[in-house]
Image (cartoon, helix red, strand yellow):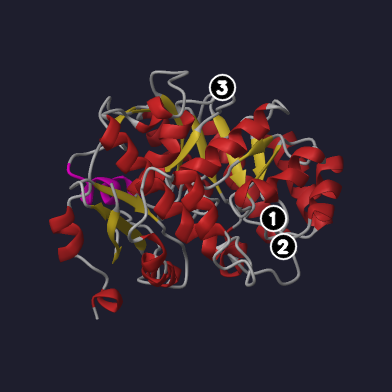
Amino acid sequence: MKITDVNAYVVMPDYGAGTDVHSEWQWTLLTIDTDAGLQGWGEASSVPRNTSLLTGRGVEAVREALVGEDPADIERLWHKLYRRYTYLGSRGFPSTILSGIDIALWDIKGKALGRPIYDLLGGTFRDSIRVYANGWFGGCQTPEQYANAARTTVDAGHDALKLDPFQEMGPFHTMYVEGQISAAGEDQGCAIVSAVREAVSSHVEILVDAHGHYNVPTAVRLANRLYDESKIGWFEEPVPPESFGALRSVREQVRAPICVGERLFTRFDFVPVFEGRLADYIMPDVVWAGGISELKKIATMAEAYYIPISPHNAQGPGQILAGAHVSMTVPNFYRLEHAVSCKPGYDHFLQEPLRWQGNQLTLWDRPGLGVDLDMERVKAELHPDWEN
């Protein structure tokens, strides 16, 4: 069997009512065709600032490196693509392109062998995947509104919620300036978390995403305050991802558990985290870190340190499905992230909807990823900048 074509499709997803997402957020879906008539699909999305348009062009740029290759050689092709741009740096933008290709290759292998991907990765540890809810607070401004949204989300069956409550820091998302927050902004954010805690059972986990906004003393103060006042389950990305020294300093001073990893790429970036005991949880992103192949390897490395994995998921259907397949197969799985507001978008581009029940996602016992893209809808709803 040989690869005959590789194509990318950048679409504008439905992020749900009340979600503050602009046209610069897209999903990059891709397909790989073979001379055996099998087609695999994957995802290489990135946000914000139109970066899915960039990764789509990246997928097109590696087409010539894949056409004529045997899609069964996933490991060799992974390394071929990983080293393709090594003089510019192989992690980040290149590993996102590689991730989508890797997911599609696993989809083809599963279809060729007639088995779901999780079976090819070693079989199942569990029958379904526990998830935690992000994106459940669209449009909320006040502590009371957050509390009401939290109750609604828990009533729907969720027992773990994630949020970034510090609204003052919104303009600095993906941007680091002083790393500080005003006293009023801090009090507002802590009041929101406190209101959520009061609204839900003590058994409901509250996870706080700091988005790497803070300097060391600010991160330490916020993490400890939130843990003492509201017993948060983790404080995520307390400082920007570039400095493991800063992360170590925070880790040594906080009482809240620490989670990192959505902006770490490939197993190589996770080595300092494991060796330095810098986190309680890790959250690699299957469409940024290197695909299904790499997420499985990172999870296995983490297992040796008894660190649970909780794959990051803030993109499209390929991301959540690929993360779920790996999550089915590893002993050190904690929860899979999913964005409540993205559920309409997940299903919109699939031939049938994902199977949710409360805080669980169930996969199909079908070949490959288990469900295919609705290619008529994908092609009909391309982002205007991609279509042109």
Where is residue 270 shown, x and y percent of the image? 69, 45
Where is residue 263 shown, x and y percent of the image? 61, 55
Left or right for 263, reference 141: right
Number of dots carrying numbers = 3
Residue at image coords 32%, 57%: 29
Is residue 65 in sight in this rendering?
yes
Q: Could you classify mark 3 by the number of other residues whose Cα lies within 10 Å: few (under 14), some (14-19), or many (20 or more)?
A: some
**Dividing the image into 4 quarters, which one contains the C terminus?**
bottom left
Instruction: Please report whichever mark, 3 or 1, sits nearer to the chain's N-terminal start.
Output: 1
**In the drawing, what numbered circle is on residue 186?**
1
Extreme-bottom residue of the structure: 388
Gap between marks 1 and 2 measured at Cα: 6 Å
Quadrant of the rendered structure where residue 297 is?
Answer: top right
Gap between marks 3 and 2 measured at Cα: 39 Å
Left or right for 341, reference 167: left
Q: Could you classify mark 2 by the number of other residues whose Cα lies within 10 Å: few (under 14), some (14-19), or many (20 or more)?
A: some
Task: Identify residue type, mark 2.
Answer: Ile
Quadrant of the rendered structure where residue 234 is?
Answer: top right
Looking at the rendering, the stretch of residues picked out in magenta corresponds to 342-351
Q: Nearer the viewer, residue 63 or 2?
A: 2
Vertical arrangement, residue 168 with respect to residue 33, above or below: below
Q: Could you classify mark 1 by the number of other residues whose Cα lies within 10 Å: few (under 14), some (14-19), or many (20 or more)?
A: many
Q: Please name the predominant secondary structure of the magenta segment in the image.
A: helix
**In the drawing, what numbered circle is on residue 45?**
none
Residue at image coords 66%, 59%: 185
Discs 1, 2 touching: Cβ within 8 Å: yes
Front label number (3 vs 1): 3
Determine which residue is flagged by label 2.
Answer: 181
Gap between marks 3 and 1 measured at Cα: 37 Å
Left or right for 127, reference 219: left
**In the drawing, what numbered circle is on residue 331?**
3
